[in-house]
Image (tube, rainbow, N blue to C red):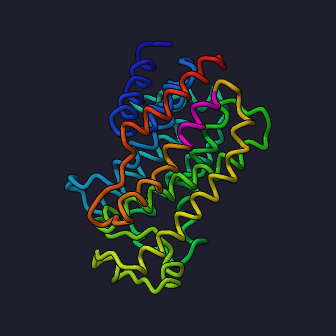
């Protein structure tokens, strides 16, 4: 590929390695020739996310919205024209063209990123799914062509796994999201356990909050179980990567349990030991698959 396109892929790889360490570790299990395309998809998502969530930014919400819309519209126009001069867009366009990934997935993602600028809570799971579809489900759908689908039936499980990853993050990040004024746990489901927004904002762990978190954790694990059969519908050389990603990302809820559900004072983290214990067997499987 030409020098500018190579630089674009390198920039996306840099974003992945710096900001998505677990995700980046999983991509190393893919054949080398597949990794740049995964980095390109991540680079687009990460860049848009940084526009929205950069707490050090001096931009107002309206200014962020204007910036996001302008940058996003530019990238969608690039995808439609099949070429780009943007440092992230070049790699994205090349990846989308190679694998014929629907542009609608990227429009849905940008819609969800804009929702983050003005939505601070969701009344129910259905409302939340409008956001999660664009922020996470479409990521799974984008990945399937790169990973290699053996059947069209691979798409629905990929969507569910993407949702599971996102919901696990919501559980882990309750405290951090409150710092941004957001709550991603459906309010009506919290109310089932007598938990209100005010209780979460008080940041005091109570039996009611623990029960509400357990309910959300059960959903993550159910989605993960439903998604597992889809891994067998991917090319054999891609399966170890997704198996490891499933174990590590959905495993975030295990770490929440280990800290006693205290998501206000501690950030649940996957230990280096667990990353290695998952990655090493997956690496052996990946080598064999190739």
Between residue 264 and residue 151, name the one nearer to us.
264
Tell me, yes or no, whether the highlighted magenta stretch contains residue 244.
Answer: yes
- The image position of residue 40, as x and y in percent, is 48, 31
Is 44 rendered above or below residue 178? above
Is 265 rendered above or below residue 108? below
Is 245 rendered above or below residue 222? above
Q: Is residue 127 left or right of residue 265?
A: right
Tell me, yes or no, whether the highlighted magenta stretch contains residue 93.
Answer: no
SS assignment for the magenta stretch, majority: helix
Between residue 122 and residue 119, name the one nearer to us.
122
Q: Is residue 245 left or right of residue 103?
A: left
Q: Residue at x 41, y 62 (%)?
A: 116
Q: Quadrant of residue 17?
A: top left
- For this orientation, the residue located farthest to the bottom is 194
**Which span of residues is magenta-colored?**
238-246
- The image position of residue 98, as x and y in percent, is 63, 25
């Amino acid at each position: 590929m030409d020098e500018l396109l190579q630089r674009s892929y390198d920039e996306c790889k840099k974003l992945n390695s710096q900001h998505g360490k677990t995700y980046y570790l999983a991509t190393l299990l893919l054949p080398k020739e597949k990794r740049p395309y995964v980095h390109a998809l991540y680079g687009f998502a990460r860049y848009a996310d940084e526009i929205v969530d950069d707490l050090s930014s001096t931009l107002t919400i309206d200014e962020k919205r204007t910036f996001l819309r302008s940058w996003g519209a530019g990238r969608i126009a690039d995808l439609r024209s099949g070429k780009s001069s943007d440092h992230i867009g070049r790699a994205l366009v090349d990846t989308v063209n190679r694998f014929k990934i629907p542009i609608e997935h990227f429009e849905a993602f940008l819609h969800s990123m804009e929702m983050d600028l003005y939505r601070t809570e969701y009344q129910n799971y259905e409302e939340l799914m409008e956001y999660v579809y664009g922020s996470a489900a479409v990521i799974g759908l984008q990945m399937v062509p790169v990973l290699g689908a053996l059947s069209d039936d691979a798409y629905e499980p990929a969507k569910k796994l993407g949702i599971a990853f996102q919901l696990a993050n919501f559980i882990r990040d309750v405290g951090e999201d409150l710092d941004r004024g957001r709550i991603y746990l459906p309010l009506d489901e919290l109310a089932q356990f007598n938990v209100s927004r005010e209780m979460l904002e008080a940041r005091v762990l109570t039996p009611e909050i623990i029960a509400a978190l357990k309910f959300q954790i059960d959903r993550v694990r159910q989605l993960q179980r439903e998604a597992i059969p889809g891994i067998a519908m991917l090319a054999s050389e891609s399966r170890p990567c997704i198996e490891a990603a499933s174990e590590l990302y959905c495993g975030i809820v295990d770490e929440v349990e280990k800290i006693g559900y205290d998501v206000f004072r501690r950030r649940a983290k996957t230990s280096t030991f667990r990353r290695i214990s998952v990655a090493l067997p997956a690496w052996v499987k990946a080598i064999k698959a190739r």
